[in-house]
Image (spheres, rainbow, N blue to C red):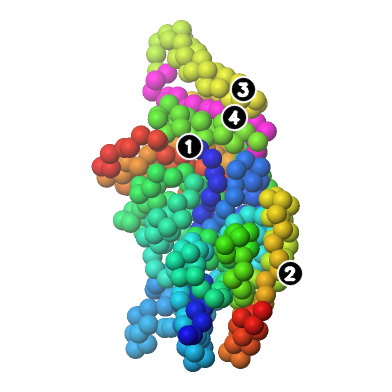
């Protein structure tokens, strides 16, 4: 059975691109257009992996990532960050939030800066699912 | 009325990161979430004769906005703020209303209206249109101009101009909730010159005394909350006097109650709120009434 991958991104062009790449590589894509819908789809669909943008309407990927990695029932879902925000900035943000909230989160399995090549994405997905 | 979520509406030409940065003082009060909105006017991308919809132009404008927002968002994320962004093609006010519906912000920050006088006469200014259609406070932020007057901390020294309307009373409560950001509030009331026309000095002085007493009572509510306050009664044309007071007391912003009423007279003659919000050099915080006002 093909693996379910949730794509959380507000840009319809990016969603279409990733969905196409996933389908061509025998994954089952599910899509969400912001952090709030992303969490809802994770809870409903129980995906095998999530690709996550950061800057989106409603909830950001920073907060959704944090939510995933601090929830015992969700923390084992591999997450690939796929965003225009730099890794440095992402890590600093998580550090600030960890200081506020007193809870650290691990670094993402993969952090890919947009734009991403199809092979790079598929390699990251395959690698994450192995672990 | 806590400001937890702020909607920052920018065309980049007016409100930029420096304006946004000066509002980050709000994190001392309760700000947690900033949402950016850039509206690409549809005339820029649609229906050019012989060209139809210019998809390339839309992509270019959206990506340009996205690059700016990513840059701004990185700074805010690193401060621990939640950040969101909307880049939409459409008309400004409908797109703001749509975003309000999705994001439910507590404060909207917008630049001054760029419509010309004739355009405003028929279609109202963006600010007036927005106030008419929402019941959320609006901060009309002014871009850096040759006077370099945009303050670093706009909430530091507000001038509250009251006319004792429900929205003015609400504005006072709003300021009280921002006490962490405020050094001093100047509170003023403008008496109409006509009210002072009397043969008796005593009557004129009585009016001034009554208004001053009401202002002092209002000031007490600020003082009780630990905010330093000064009261002023001015006489004359409210528009001119409010701006005069803002200059005299070096206000960092003008706070006004806003009405959703939009009578024909207001459209043609202009309201005090609209004129000050659109034309003064000061950032203007417009606070609606808590009570539902009937739209005329």
Q: Which mark is residue B186?
A: 4
Q: CA distance from mark 2 to mark 1?
A: 42 Å
Q: Is residue B191 magenta?
A: yes
Verify CB contact (< 8 Å) between mark 2 and mark 1: no
Relative height, residue B105 to residue B228 (above, below): below
Check disc 3 and report its element: helix, strand or loop.
Answer: helix
Q: Specify whether disc 4 shares its chain with disc 3.
A: yes
Name the front one of labels 4 and 3: 3
Real-space Cα separation, disc 4 to disc 3, in angstroms: 12 Å
Q: Is residue B110 above or below residue B253?
A: below
Q: Is residue A17 in view?
A: no
Contact between marks 4 and 3 (CB within 8 A): the answer is no
Residue at point 52%, 35% (across, down)? B174
* Crowd class of label 3 (few under 14; some 14 to 19; many from 20; radius 10 Å): some
Location of residue B71 in the rendering, given as x and y in whole percent from the top left corner: 65, 67
Q: Nearer the viewer, mark 3 or mark 2?
A: 2
Total marks drawn? 4
Residue at x 62% of width, y 40% of height = B29
User: Helix, strand, or loop for circle 4?
Assistant: strand
Q: Which residues make up the magenta segment?
A: B181-196
**For mark 2, what is the residue?**
A88
Asked if residue B262 lies left or right of residue B113, the reply is: left
Q: Earlier in the sequence, mark 4 or mark 1?
A: 4
Dots 3 and 2: beta carbons under 8 Å?
Answer: no
Label disc, if present, on residue B256 of the rendered structure? 1
* Location of mark 3 (residue): B223
Locate residue A123, reporting x and y percent: 63, 88
Quote the CA–CA distance across marks 2 and 4. 44 Å
Label 1 with label 3: CB-CB less than 8 Å: no
Which residue is at the front of the view, B268 or B32? B32
């Amino acid at each position: 059975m093909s693996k379910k991958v949730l794509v959380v991104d507000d840009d319809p062009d990016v969603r279409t691109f990733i969905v196409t790449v996933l389908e061509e590589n025998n994954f089952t894509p599910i899509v969400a257009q912001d952090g709030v819908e992303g969490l809802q789809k994770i809870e409903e669909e129980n995906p095998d992996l999530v690709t996550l943008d950061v800057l989106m309407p409603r909830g950001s990927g920073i907060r959704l990532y944090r939510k995933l990695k601090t929830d015992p029932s969700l923390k084992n879902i591999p997450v690939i960050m796929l965003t225009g925000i730099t890794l440095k900035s992402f890590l600093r943000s998580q550090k600030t939030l960890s200081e506020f909230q007193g809870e650290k989160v691990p670094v993402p399995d993969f952090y890919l800066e947009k734009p991403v090549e199809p092979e790079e994405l598929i390699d990251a997905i395959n690698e994450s699912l192995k672990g | 009325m806590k400001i937890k979520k702020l909607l920052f509406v920018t065309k980049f030409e007016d409100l930029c990161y420096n304006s946004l940065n000066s509002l980050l003082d709000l994190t001392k009060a309760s700000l947690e979430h900033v949402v950016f909105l850039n509206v690409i006017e549809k005339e820029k991308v649609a229906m050019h004769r012989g060209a139809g919809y210019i998809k390339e132009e839309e992509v270019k404008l959206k990506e340009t906005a996205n690059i700016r927002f990513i840059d701004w968002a990185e700074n805010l994320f690193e401060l621990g703020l939640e950040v969101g962004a909307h880049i939409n093609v459409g008309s400004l006010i409908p797109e703001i209303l749509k975003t309000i519906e999705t994001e439910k912000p507590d404060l909207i920050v917008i630049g001054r209206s760029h419509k010309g006088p004739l355009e405003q006469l028929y279609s109202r200014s963006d600010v007036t249109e927005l106030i008419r259609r929402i019941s959320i406070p609006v901060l009309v932020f002014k871009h850096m101009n040759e006077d370099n007057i945009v303050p670093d901390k706009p909430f530091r020294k507000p001038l509250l101009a009251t006319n004792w309307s429900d929205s003015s009373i609400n504005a006072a409560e709003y300021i009280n909730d921002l006490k962490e950001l405020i050094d001093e509030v100047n509170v003023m009331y403008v008496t109409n010159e006509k009210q002072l026309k009397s043969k008796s000095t005593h009557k004129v002085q009585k009016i001034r005394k009554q208004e001053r007493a009401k202002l002092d009572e209002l000031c007490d509510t600020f003082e009780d909350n630990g905010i330093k306050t000064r009261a002023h009664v001015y006489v004359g044309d409210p528009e001119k006097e409010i701006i005069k007071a803002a200059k005299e007391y070096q206000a960092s912003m003008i706070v006004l109650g806003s009405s959703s009423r939009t009578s024909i007279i207001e459209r043609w003659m202009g309201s005090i709120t609209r004129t000050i919000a659109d034309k003064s050099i000061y950032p203007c915080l417009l606070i609606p009434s808590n009570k539902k006002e009937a739209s005329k």
